[in-house]
Image (spheres, rainbow, N blue to C red):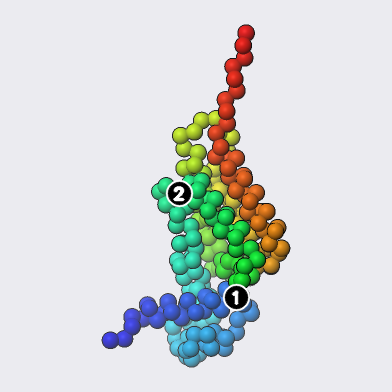
Amino acid sequence: MGRPKSYERDCIARKAMEVFWRHGFHGTSTQALVDAMGVNRFSLYAEFGNKQALYEAALTLYELEVVGPYFLALESLQGGLKEMEDLFTAFASSAGQPGSEMGCFACNAATDRAADDSGVRLFVHAYVQRISAAFTHGLRNARKGFVGLPAADVVSEGYYLATIVVGFFVLLRAQVAPDVLRAAAHNAMRHIRYLTMPVRAPKPKLN
């Protein structure tokens, strides 16, 4: 019995994701896709219609197989301070490592295609919204039950942390010095700790 069509489609999209991720939309030729996936042009167009549709399928698979697992712990019911710190620790550790120059496929799409492609733009907006919501969720959990915490709009802070993440991966792609990226990650963690650190109440004045 042959493999399900959905399986074949995902296999093609997965191989395409690796090529698009490394070389971008404009840097990837149809021939490069054909070579990477081991299929002929007819099969490629019959399955996806065109290069653009394949690119969007690769982005969708990226969110499912890469973004999802990466943020799973933070998005869980108990996700909080530890999970946020674990993320930024992982980001800091990735700076300067082999393969880090690939950055994040979704962030690459933001600079590569989002300005000119409404479909990719919607994907990037949803990606940023998801990361923002994950950090907002984590901050709410980390601040739960504490009094005297610094004043904070956790929704706005979630957006702020999401922009740090996106910017981090754009600079990772540009191979900015690892020390710069590690400093950014460590300062993001310091900001998170500040937002989730109980503040001592002032001592009452003696008459």
- Check contact, mark 1 vs mark 2: CB within 8 A: no
Task: Tell me the residue that label 1 is attached to.
Answer: 22
> Mark 2 falls on what kind of element?
loop
Q: Residue at (49%, 42%) from the top-left corner? A: 142
Q: Residue at (54%, 76%) from the top-left corner? A: 18
Residue flagged by tag 1: what amino acid is it?
A: Arg
Instruction: Provide residue 23's location: percent of width, then percent of height.
Output: 62, 77
Residue flagged by tag 2: what amino acid is it?
A: Gly
Task: Tell me the residue that label 2 is attached to.
Answer: 79
Q: Give how far apart the Cα atoms at labels 1 and 2 are.
A: 31 Å
> Which quadrant of the figure contains the C terminus?
top right
> Which quadrant of the figure contains the N terminus?
bottom left
Does 168 sit left or right of 143 as displayed?
right
- Residue 177 visible in image: yes
Q: Residue at (56%, 63%) from the top-left corner? A: 124
> Mark 1 falls on what kind of element?
helix
- Residue 129 visible in image: no
Determine whether 159 is above or below 168 in the image: above
Determine whether 147 is above or below 75 in the image: above
State which quadrant residue 149 falls in.
top right
Instruction: Provide residue 86's location: percent of width, then percent of height.
Output: 53, 53
Of 46 and 136, which appears nearest the observer?
Answer: 136
Determine whether 53 is above or below 195 in the image: below
Q: Counting other residues with Cα less than 10 Å from the Cα at mark 2, is it few (<14), some (14-19), or many (20 or more)? A: many
Instruction: Provide residue 206's location: percent of width, then percent of height.
Output: 62, 11
